[in-house]
Amino acid sequence: MRRFTSVHDLINGPGLDVAIHDALEFARHPWINTEIGRRRTVGLLFMNPSLRTRMSTQKAATLMGAETIVLNAGSDSWTLETRDGVVMDGSSTEHIKEAAAVMGAYCDVLGLRTFASLTDRDADYAEDVLEKFITHAGVPVVSLESATRHPLQSFADLITIEQFKPTPRPKVVLTWAPHPKALPQAVANSFIEWMSAANVDLVVTHPKGYELAPEFVSGVAVTNDQDEALAGADFVYAKNWSSYEQYGQILSQDRSWTVTEDKMSLTNNAKFMHCLPVRRNMIVTDGVIDGPNSIVIPQAANRVVSAQTALYYLLKGPA
Amino acid sequence: MRRFTSVHDLINGPGLDVAIHDALEFARHPWINTEIGRRRTVGLLFMNPSLRTRMSTQKAATLMGAETIVLNAGSDSWTLETRDGVVMDGSSTEHIKEAAAVMGAYCDVLGLRTFASLTDRDADYAEDVLEKFITHAGVPVVSLESATRHPLQSFADLITIEQFKPTPRPKVVLTWAPHPKALPQAVANSFIEWMSAANVDLVVTHPKGYELAPEFVSGVAVTNDQDEALAGADFVYAKNWSSYEQYGQILSQDRSWTVTEDKMSLTNNAKFMHCLPVRRNMIVTDGVIDGPNSIVIPQAANRVVSAQTALYYLLKGPA
Amino acid sequence: MRRFTSVHDLINGPGLDVAIHDALEFARHPWINTEIGRRRTVGLLFMNPSLRTRMSTQKAATLMGAETIVLNAGSDSWTLETRDGVVMDGSSTEHIKEAAAVMGAYCDVLGLRTFASLTDRDADYAEDVLEKFITHAGVPVVSLESATRHPLQSFADLITIEQFKPTPRPKVVLTWAPHPKALPQAVANSFIEWMSAANVDLVVTHPKGYELAPEFVSGVAVTNDQDEALAGADFVYAKNWSSYEQYGQILSQDRSWTVTEDKMSLTNNAKFMHCLPVRRNMIVTDGVIDGPNSIVIPQAANRVVSAQTALYYLLKGPA
């Protein structure tokens, strides 16, 4: 496998079922394969702050026996030019062509964390930065979250659902929930993409105006009635996102969408999931997230498992 | 041992004498036990900048054979909510409950560096952040300095005194000294706590208004006459702190409290100590700190030893 | 070898020819000597942002089997006082004497990245910070770029020329090129110093007013006619620097000095080199840097080789 940027890389690579199997094996036996990373270096470049992704990916590399070099490319250290043919007489100090190629010369696998501008939808959805980075890196690349997807999170979500599902084909509900700041659609997009490829009944629910990009939700059951969606759910996955149509805008902070114990009583004793960090009593009440059906910590712990599995395939190479 | 946050954790754990013995052994043979940390990860979370503590603790983890993951949670990356039951609609992005639990899921031991607000004395002295972190971490926790204590520093101080003491029960003087900025009482509190548990004659001296918290100084010899305190001292430990009564205030920058060669001449050829970083010619003159009786560098080197010993007990676990 | 701060440390140490030989060997067999760094720690202190130097030096330490501790001493974390005898009542929190000595107590080799003020030429060219750091570190020190030199870059440049040279004594041209910001002279100074010690024909070309410091260019062929310089060149090394005479000033942003395909056609099919990061279409056109004669990526890759070779000598010690 040469890249891990969406579920399609697994589908077109080892196959999603094989990947789930391998991931569950790594979850049980984390130190089973420390040789594959020996004398190899994983470079992680963060274009915006990250602690959870960084920590879990660094741990995953260690489990594979690999060294990790972490770079935080803040606004004060490195600003990357991504346009072609431009005269670089402004504030950008390096072109992504050189940045990717040089890091690729130092490392065996690279990870890149980019982020949505939330102002230029076309640029965000073209995944310009990630794709150019991959083109010039010369080594396999893992997405540590991009403008429109968060595949390591979604893979961890799927692993978690596999571990906790009460039936072979559980009902999974992705519900929008309120948040004080404008957030990308990446986690929601990606979750839908992975659930659509998995053996689950997926229902997405959100207020009007929060419709997601057609390429992610076409064919997916969507409703604006949260209660209807929650009925009989085995998993409730809460997440905020800003509007795709009125790009990057906050259209609602309606707390009637907060996941409460009353809302959870509509479900089939559902497990509660969230990618974290979570705004307590905005996204979800203390009662739900601190309750016995909350699996947010095992879900977060599976970020190591998804990263380990992805790195395993990238370190193994195309074979 | 499940936590290392004050001298009491050693007293109630292996015992202070055993801990000193083990520390002196690690000082002589740093690589004596690299197996205990094998395949284990130490996560260090810094809520404010640190270089000395970070470097020595990372080195200590390496000496034990453990991996280290360092997180600098700056104001621009992660802001932790610590209150219970609050609606998180402001600037805090994650509750300490999740932050601690997730990090505990990735690591075998966690270190936390918090800091005094110097504005809310009750909150600072309740050690709210540290205690909640410990409650939710699920793994052993080492304090890398908290609002009111700096146990790894104090343990290093005690190890240093053990190595350099000219008599079985030396006279140790903690003297306030001037500084241009308001500093926490943590180092002073902690030093007093450790010295009170050790076999030394402790005298604390400071200008009026700089009385420390009763729970730390009750039963300790305190004087406002620096010269009287210094008479016959075997060790002079200089440190600035801001006022406890007029909480966080600078009441004096009186340079007559600076530790000079004249002051040192009152002592029993005392060794000079400071936790560093030190403001030269405010806290201490160049002549003293550059002189033959200054042991600030061996003292700083012992930060590796205290961290190694603390990690050793935490990695060994409750047994 | 106790320090690696200029080519003279290699000349007075193992000898430049031996160093080139060893470097080319490390380039071919990077993992040939992982024992020399075992149980040893390399501490890297960056006084300004760096990603390339940090990444390559960290990788180099790994290749030697050593642990690395990286410190980014930003303006918000640590501010070092470098003057002697000063009363530290301002914003500087630690004197370089303690900083160097403490880091030396924790590490076996230290690296320091300092930078030119571009305002005080005498202070910059005295290399005050680097020299005091070396004096007090107590362990070998490698310069990760200083105010007036960038030896790891220049050594990598020389290794690259050795790998790509079409004749035993190639013609090497260092040409100034325009840039929107004022840059130090360090890379240019250092490149000249290394080329002057190597078996190459060196020509330096720049607009009037960009004369470099006499101690670097005395005896070197210098011309203000870029075309004349480029004639017959085997290597074209482009670099911007600010004025030495009108210290730190930008005197020209003349794009007629940009290295274009037309300019390259004057050469002997020369290879194009730059230390990166590079301002595309200011320093060099896309056509040249993306063309078949551009060796900027192998050149950057050799930063690992130069760092590995320098660390090898420093870890081996004076013998």
Image: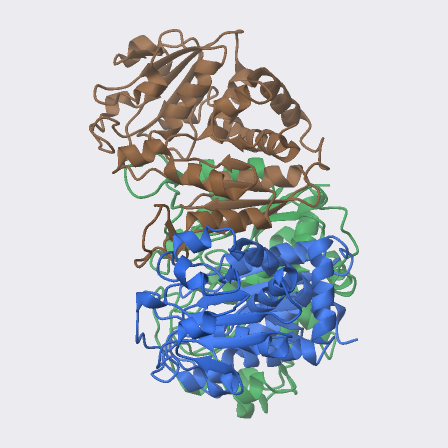
Chain colours: A blue, B brown, C green
Q: Position of residue C195 (x, y in %)?
A: 61, 67
Left or right position of A203 against A9? left
Whether residue C7 can be seen here: no
B238 or B124, which lies in front? B124
Q: Which of these two is toward me, B99 or C222?
A: B99
Q: Is residue A283 above or below residue A208?
A: above
Q: Position of residue A101 (x, y in %)?
A: 61, 74
Instruction: Give how far across and how far down residue C241 sits, in percent.
Output: 44, 70
Count the numbered circles shown: 0
Foreground of the two, B312 or C125:
B312
On screen, residue C296 above or below C154: below
- The quadrant in which the C terminus of chain B is found is top right
Residue at 40 percent across and 19 percent down: it is: B192
> Is A108 drawn above or below residue B151 in the view shown?
below
Residue C179: tell me if it is visible.
Answer: yes
Q: Residue at image x 35%, y 72%?
A: C250
The quadrant the N terminus of chain B occupies is top right
| Left or right: A254, with A69 as reference point | left
